[in-house]
Amino acid sequence: MSDQEDYVSIVTVPGEIGVTPDLGRVALTNWGGDFSAIGVCDLHAGSVEVLQANRKAGLRMPALSPDGKTIAFTAQPMEPRLDGLASLCLAPARGGEARRIGARAYYVAPSFSSDGGRLLVFAGDKAYGPVQLVEIDLTSGAEAAVWSGAFNGGSLTAYDPTGAGYWVHAQGPAASLEEANGWSALDYDTKNGSPRLFRILRQGETPRPFTVNLGRGWGLVGVTNDEVVLGTVALETGSRAALMNRQGEARLLWRSPRSGELPDGWAVSADAKRVLTVRIHKDDAGNFLDRYDIAVFETGSGESGKILSKVLSSDLRATNHDLKLS
């Protein structure tokens, strides 16, 4: 495969995509061997800005600022002695110098505030260990714990659009970092019979579990302007998305009726009127091809809803940029 094909073939780990609130831009990641890059796809222009790392580092967990001009991501060095550690970085969406932020050894699941001035992220002092939910001011670089306790692990963070707190998908919580560090199998699910979705209304407040009855395999994807939480359910026969209100009542948004069409990553618009999916193509033997498609659907109860737009990776005009990691 040529370098040019590598550049264009930006794919995504399931669930690891970043989008702007209007779904106009989507960020995908890819890494392997000496190659690691982030692709920021502009669905209106039909183009992709490819940011290739100048060092051996796996670029993961992309988050786009609301205006789409800045990208946050984690950078994991591809060196055995540093295996698992992940720095938090900021960079222009068109490439250039990446700025490392935060003072912890490990970060996961960053998300931007609605004004683009802050980042919400899980932070820890060792790879894959207990993490705290912290907020970073992007102007001053100051990092503050949202809650004094800790989680055993986390996979997604989100601001409540009204400014009334935060949402997280995580294992835990524990009353303190020391307590989380001492428990080898801390898991709120098994101890309390509740899903791993928690809401923190005010700084310092203990996370409140948010219980829903949607079956197995669901997960938090985001929060809409109407303060309802987007959840997913993966079934043997397909995948569904639902909006849930504060009482845990679900409203079906979108579904894919066939398991072969399960998305490799997806998101919802801030107004909950559109769903975006990313799907990697496979051949008849189940091997991944170096092509993917991005589709935007109108939400509704019909099968998959109305397709508003769809683009194959080969249709995107790629511009390559260096991403300089310190």
Image (cartoon, rainbow, N blue to C red):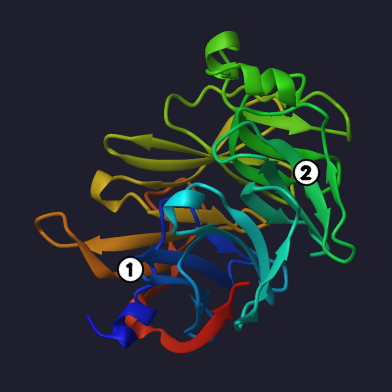
Residue highlighted by disc 2: 134
Seen at 73% across and 26% down, the residue is 177
Could you tell me residue 40's position as x and y percent? 53, 75
The reply to whether residue 172 is in sight is yes
244 versus 262 height, above or below: above
Q: Is residue 86 left or right of residue 117?
A: left
| Figure check: 137 above or below 291 | above
For the residue pair 290 and 278, the one nearer the viewer reads as 290
Asked if the residues shown at circle 1 and circle 2 are in contact, with their CB atoms under 8 angstroms apart, the answer is no
Q: Earlier in the sequence, mark 1 or mark 2?
A: 2
Residue at the spot 46% in from the left edge and 72% down from the top edge? 37
Q: Please rate how many residues cluster around mark 1, counting C-alpha atoms within 10 Å: few if below 14, some from 14 to 19, many from 20.
A: many
Q: Secondary structure at mark 1?
A: strand
Q: Secondary structure at mark 2?
A: strand
What quarter of the picture does the C terminus occupy? bottom right
Question: Which corner quadrant holds the N terminus?
Answer: bottom left
The image quadrant that residue 196 belongs to is top right
Q: Amino acid at mark 2?
A: Val
Asked if 12 appears above or below 325 in the picture, the reply is above
Please state which amino acid type lies under the numbered disc 1: Tyr
Q: Which residue does the numbered mark 1 point to in the structure image?
A: 292
Answer with left or right where residue 34 lies relative to residue 291.
Answer: right
Compared across the picture, whether 177 is left or right of 30 comes to: right
